[in-house]
Amino acid sequence: IQMTQSPSSLSVFVGDRVTITCRASQSISRYLNWYQQKAGEAPKLLISGASSLQSGVPPRFSGSGSGTDFTLTINSLQPEDFATYYCQQSFTFARYTFGQGTKVEI
Amino acid sequence: EVQLVESGGGLVPPGGSLRLSCVGSGFIFSRHSMNWVRQAPGKGLEWVSYINISSSTIYYADSVKGRFTISRDNAKNSLYLQMNSLRAEDTAVYYCAREVYYGGKNCLDPWGQGTLVTVSS
């Protein structure tokens, strides 16, 4: 299963609303996770099952979608949100694939 | 605190071998499947390998099949990746990641800090 994210990068201002999309090459139900990776750090799980926010993740982050089309939304972007975001499908058990990433820049 | 710590990375010539280790703490290691994921410099994430709790089910990405071997020692809370016949394109930061289920959906959480493998002469 191929995962395609768009855009690959975007330049935004603090306070902006950001929307990142992820498309699967076939239906993956809601087996879609989002990760945040800051420069020089390991990825961190933000959202599982397409829309379940992980404990400790600010509510300005939200996820939606099912089937082949998914969205990560960040409301009122904060300085600490500048990072690269990856989607990942877990539909094909233990043979996971990631999107190519979306870099959110100032 | 749930934590994963990788080690074993370094510089190795093409065709060489390296063994990575990952030690888990703060959780019952034997109850979780584990994964290796890598990231080439400036590139995205690539899943490498999976092992279930009993080591009875193992999967590899096509790019490493036949060259890499994943294993675990639950008594030592440890995960391993034996990498043979290394190529320049294997150069990457290698992360270990725990598999968990939230709301019936599997995901990788947490990830270790990563260990850098550089394949170069």
Image: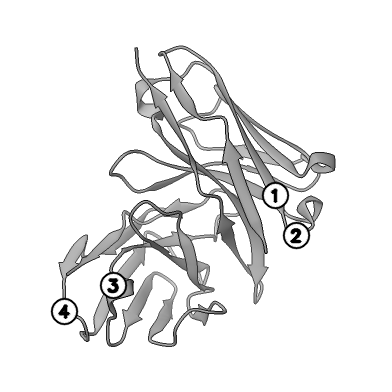
Q: How far is the residue under mark 4 from the one under mark 3?
A: 15 Å
Vertical position of residue A23 compared to residue B52: above or below:
below
Chain bearing mark 1: B
Neighbourhood count class around disc 2 (C-alpha, 10 Å): few under 14, some 14–19, many 20 upward: few
| Image height of B67 relative to A25, above or below | above
Q: Check chain identity for marks 2 and 1: say if they share one.
A: yes
Q: Nearer the viewer, residue B70 or B8?
A: B8
The residue tagged with tag 4: helix, strand or loop?
loop
- What percent of the width, then of the height, locates residue B27? 75, 59
Query: Looking at the image, do the residues carrying marks 1 and 3 touch, with CB atoms under 8 Å apart?
Result: no
Instruction: Please name the amino acid that badge 3 sits on.
Output: Ile
Amino acid type for the residue under numbered disc 4: Phe
Q: Nearer the viewer, residue A41 or B111?
A: A41
- Gap in angstroms between the C-alphas marked 2 and 1: 7 Å
Is disc 4 on the same chain as disc 1? no
Query: Badge 4 is on which residue?
Result: A13
Q: From the image, tell me which residue sits under label 3.
A: A20
Quarter holding the C terminus of chain A? bottom left
**Which secondary structure lies at badge 3?**
strand
The answer to whether marks 2 and 3 sit on the same chain is no
Q: Earlier in the sequence, mark 4 or mark 3?
A: 4
